[in-house]
Amino acid sequence: MIEDPEIDVVDIATPNNLHAEIAIAAAEAGKHIICEKPLARGAEEARPVSEAARRAGIVTMVAFSYRRTPAVALAKKYIEEGAIGDILNFRGTYLQDWSADPDSPLSWRFQKAIAGSGSLGDIATHVVDLARYLVGEIAGVNSLLKTWVPDRPIQTGGVDKLGAAGSLADAERGPVDVDDEVITLLKFAGGAIGSLEATRNAHGRNNFLTFEIHGTRGSLVFNYERRDELQVCFSDDPADRRGFRTVYTGPNHPYGDALWPIPALGIGYGETKIIETYELFKAITEGIPASPDFGDGYQIEKIADAIQESAAKSQWVEITPLDRSVGTTGGGRR
């Protein structure tokens, strides 16, 4: 299929261990590529993918689709306009409960050889993407990783049902060799500080992807489970009206002209993928870079590696920034 001249774009939606091989082959064939996150199982594997794409001069995108949510894009607009001033703090979470049951199946997501990491690569990288998108480059991390369930029932068949898989208490069990939970402090290159927490073992949390950003002139709060809403607070509001209020996204907000004609009619996961595809095709037809591209995917893998290193050493680990002058990062971590 990659060699077929009728195919212009390759969409990589396989488990993580196959991303690099497919992406490099597609790049060498001159195809534009969108790849599911994470780009690879670590920075060492991601770097040649980024370099192959740069050599080929193709448009690439890593599918961190949550940044396409209109409320998130609206938060980006407010930040760029200076509405909340200089950013002081970012607090991000991604909490799920689909693997809280210790008798849920041993998905490939619990196997390091396939996934690379656990909650870190699977969901924490979404928060890393939002942090970089909204606040800027992450310069250092101080982290903890924890595996709560050491083994799980081996599933039959290759279908990964996640939360719909049910319990397999009587099945043979296999080892889990990735993290279930990650907590890390963040230092941003621009001077802001922050924190990130991600787990798939939080009973009662379904897709609790959130951020709260504090600036010198206001604050922003987002919760993906209420994805049509952005909570805002601006310090220049009159004293008797100051506090959080809710903006319901609609036609007057990012992507609103192409979606629903009334605010709060409802944006779903499917719409964010439509927006993502629109941005990819727009980049291809206009000959402009897409974002986040494979350089960003490589940088996020450097950050994920630094989180693992920090947890292993119980110390801060610094991260070199993304070098846009060459289309990819260079030099590795210090």
Image (cartoon, rainbow, N blue to C red):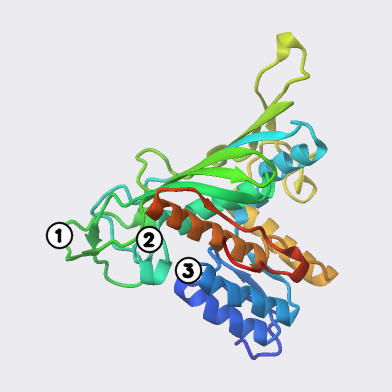
Q: Amino acid at mark 1?
A: Asp
Label 3 and label 1: CA atoms lie apart by 31 Å
Residue 260 x, y percent position in the rendering: 72, 45
> Which label's residue is closer to the chain start, 1 or 2?
2
> Which label's residue is closer to the chain start, 3 or 2?
3
Q: Up-down: is 298 above or below 223?
A: below
Label 1 and label 2: CA atoms lie apart by 18 Å
Between 265 and 6, the residue placed more toward the observer is 6
Between 334 and 195, the residue placed more toward the observer is 334
Q: Is residue 49 left or right of residue 277?
A: left
Q: Which mark is residue 170?
A: 1
Q: Is residue 196 left or right of residue 204?
A: right
In the displayed orientation, state which residue is furthest to the front.
334
Judged by depth in the image, the label closer to the viewer, 3 or 2, is 3
Residue at 65% across / 47% down in the picture?
Answer: 69
Q: For the N terminus, which image quadrant?
A: bottom right
Judged by depth in the image, the label closer to the viewer, 3 or 1, is 3
> Which label's residue is closer to the chain start, 3 or 1?
3
Q: Which residue is mark 3?
A: 41
Local packing at callout 2 (Cα closer than 10 Å; few below 14, some 14-19, many 20+) is few
Residue 253 makes an appearance in the image: yes
Q: Up-down: is 307 above or below 70?
A: below
Element assignment for label 2: loop
Residue at 41% across / 61% down in the picture?
Answer: 117
Q: Amino acid at mark 3?
A: Arg
Label 3 and label 2: CA atoms lie apart by 21 Å
Element assignment for label 1: loop
Q: Amino acid at mark 2?
A: Lys
Q: Which residue is mark 2?
A: 161
Element assignment for label 3: loop
